[in-house]
């Protein structure tokens, strides 16, 4: 059993999530902007810490210059404390001329420090790692910072508490966070508005049109009207419009075919009964004394039998396709002559008929099905020659040729009529779409193509300077008989 239509509804997946495409787009935009802010924050906080320490080292450099010019017995009383307080350090040391000069708040420098930072060769990766360490696990003891010196000093180093540095880094982080949130919000809003106008809105329009077309696919007003956009969405709109137009046309055609098939089945049922009665009456013609009637009676009976079989096959069309061909070797010249005689072709009649099939040529095929193929192709040629006549200066001619070709048997129906119109060539072998004559159904060529395909062959309209050339290629029987 088929699933109910609601189970296949396009709108069903909406119940699986509360987030629409716009909300998902906004969320993804915010996440990526925040990720970018995090990637920006890491080098920013590391640079802030580096600059903060450089400021302290710069102040310590001034103190080092003072130490460099100080007398051997040291600075005046109180000057050391003022220097240390100005730098914000517990101790300042400088190497001057190979001797280490020291300023300290205590009588002795701190015995140990938590960590040492050498600003002279600090890499960016190390700076980021150390900055994160300050925020995550602040030091409980002072830290030692070494930097470049000015003047005659080799280097300068300071011992400072890390707490002021951590407070400054936290304050900077909060400020950067607020700015980042503001930038993120404005960026996400701008991106959301732009993408919603350029992409999400048109996609919603496409989705809405698909659901409307699903509800009533045969309504031509449900076909989308493409915009003038030249991008991928414009291409999608035009492709959807072509697909919907083709599908709507196919659905209307199939509906008409279904209705036609029902009517044909009813007519065919009665026609089969009438043909069967005509066949029974035709059996009595064999007993007549008229030699001409007795000569044509078997062909009439065979034709009626073929018509009854065709009616029976038509009644079964809705249940199955054409029957599998009963392949046997069939003399093609005789088969062509029989179809020409049934169509009223002969000597002294128009159009002139030429049977150029070699007498000895046979082809593996189903004689009844191949007779239908020949009848359809030859009837179309006769109609084209009768309707428009042959080209100026030529008499209308219908010719059938055959011969072996590339491991196949090639059978060609040739006429010197007006040829096949260009408008009919694209759908030449499709029922109701490939009609050559005005008002025609195109069933003849469609049936012929199906029967040839059942034989494993092919049928095609070959290029020609005048008229039309239909080539039927039938697989030749192999040497082993298969």
Image (cartoon, helix red, strand yellow):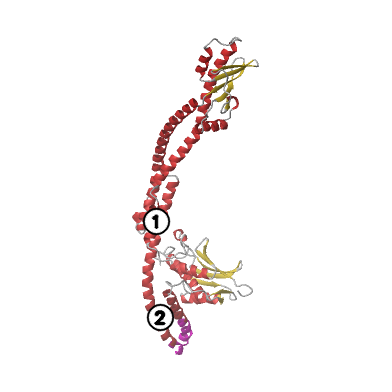
Q: Determine the secondary structure under disc 2.
A: helix
* Residue projecting furthest to the right: 98
Residue at screen point 45% across, 85% down: 293
Q: CA distance from mark 2 to mark 1?
A: 42 Å
Q: Is residue 416 visible?
A: yes
Q: Which mark is residue 16?
A: none
Magenta span dominant secondary structure = helix
In this picture, residue 142 sits left or right of residue 249: right
Q: Quadrant of the N terminus?
A: bottom left
* Residue projecting furthest to the front: 107
Q: Which residue corresponds to mark 2? A: 275
Mark 2 / mark 1, whichever is N-terminal: 1
> What residue range appears in magenta?
284-301
Estimate the x, y position of residue 170 in percent, counting from the top left.
46, 30
Q: Which residue corresponds to mark 1? A: 245
Q: Determine the secondary structure under disc 1.
A: helix
Give the answer, above or below, for where 189 lies relative to 403. Answer: above
Estimate the x, y position of residue 78 in percent, counting from the top left.
52, 12
In the foreground, 467 or 245: 245
Give the answer, above or below, for where 259 lies relative to 173. Answer: below
In the foreground, 2 or 172: 172
Estimate the x, y position of residue 118 in percent, counting from the top left.
59, 26
């Amino acid at each position: 059993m088929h699933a109910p239509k609601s189970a296949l509804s396009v709108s069903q997946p909406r119940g699986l999530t509360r987030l629409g495409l716009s909300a998902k787009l906004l969320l993804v935009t915010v996440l990526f902007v925040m990720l970018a802010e995090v990637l920006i924050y890491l080098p920013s906080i590391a640079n802030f810490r580096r600059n903060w320490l450089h400021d302290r080292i710069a102040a310590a450099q001034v103190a080092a210059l003072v130490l460099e010019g100080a007398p051997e017995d040291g600075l005046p009383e109180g000057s050391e404390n003022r220097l240390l307080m100005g730098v914000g350090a517990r101790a300042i040391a400088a190497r001057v001329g190979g001797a280490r000069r020291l300023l300290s708040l205590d009588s002795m420098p701190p015995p140990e420090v938590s960590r040492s930072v050498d600003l002279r060769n600090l890499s960016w990766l190390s700076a980021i790692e150390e900055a994160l360490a300050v925020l995550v696990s602040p030091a409980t003891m002072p830290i030692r910072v070494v930097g470049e010196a000015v003047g005659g000093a080799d280097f300068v180093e300071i011992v400072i508490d890390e707490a002021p540095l951590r407070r400054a880094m936290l304050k900077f982080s909060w400020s950067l966070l607020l700015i980042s949130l503001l930038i993120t919000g404005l960026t996400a809003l701008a991106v959301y508005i732009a993408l919603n106008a350029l992409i999400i809105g048109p996609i919603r329009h496409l989705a809405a049109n698909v659901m409307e077309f699903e509800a009533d696919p045969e309504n031509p007003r449900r076909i989308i009207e493409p915009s003038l956009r030249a991008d991928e969405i414009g291409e999608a709109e035009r492709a959807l419009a072509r697909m919907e137009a083709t599908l709507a046309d196919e659905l209307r055609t199939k509906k008409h075919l279904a209705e036609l098939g029902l009517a044909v089945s009813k007519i065919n049922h009665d026609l089969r009964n009438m043909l069967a009665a005509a066949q029974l009456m035709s059996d009595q013609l064999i007993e007549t004394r008229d030699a001409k009637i007795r000569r044509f009676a078997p062909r009439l009976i065979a034709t009626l039998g073929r018509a009854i079989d065709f009616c029976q096959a038509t009644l079964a069309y809705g249940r199955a396709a054409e029957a599998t061909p009963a392949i046997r070797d069939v003399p093609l010249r005789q088969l062509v002559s029989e179809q020409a005689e049934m169509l009223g072709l002969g000597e002294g009649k128009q159009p002139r008929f030429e049977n150029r099939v070699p007498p000895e040529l046979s082809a593996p095929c189903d004689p009844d099905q191949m007779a239908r193929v020949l009848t359809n192709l030859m009837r179309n040629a006769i109609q084209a020659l009768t309707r428009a006549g042959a080209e100026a200066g030529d008499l209308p001619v219908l010719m059938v040729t055959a011969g072996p070709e590339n491991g196949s048997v090639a059978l060609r129906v040739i006429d010197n009529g007006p040829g096949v119109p260009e408008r009919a060539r694209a759908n030449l072998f499709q029922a109701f779409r490939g009609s050559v004559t005005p008002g025609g159904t195109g069933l003849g060529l469609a049936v012929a193509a199906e029967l040839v395909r059942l034989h494993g062959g092919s049928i095609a309209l070959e290029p020609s300077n005048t008229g039309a050339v239909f080539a039927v290629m039938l697989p030749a029987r192999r040497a082993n008989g298969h």
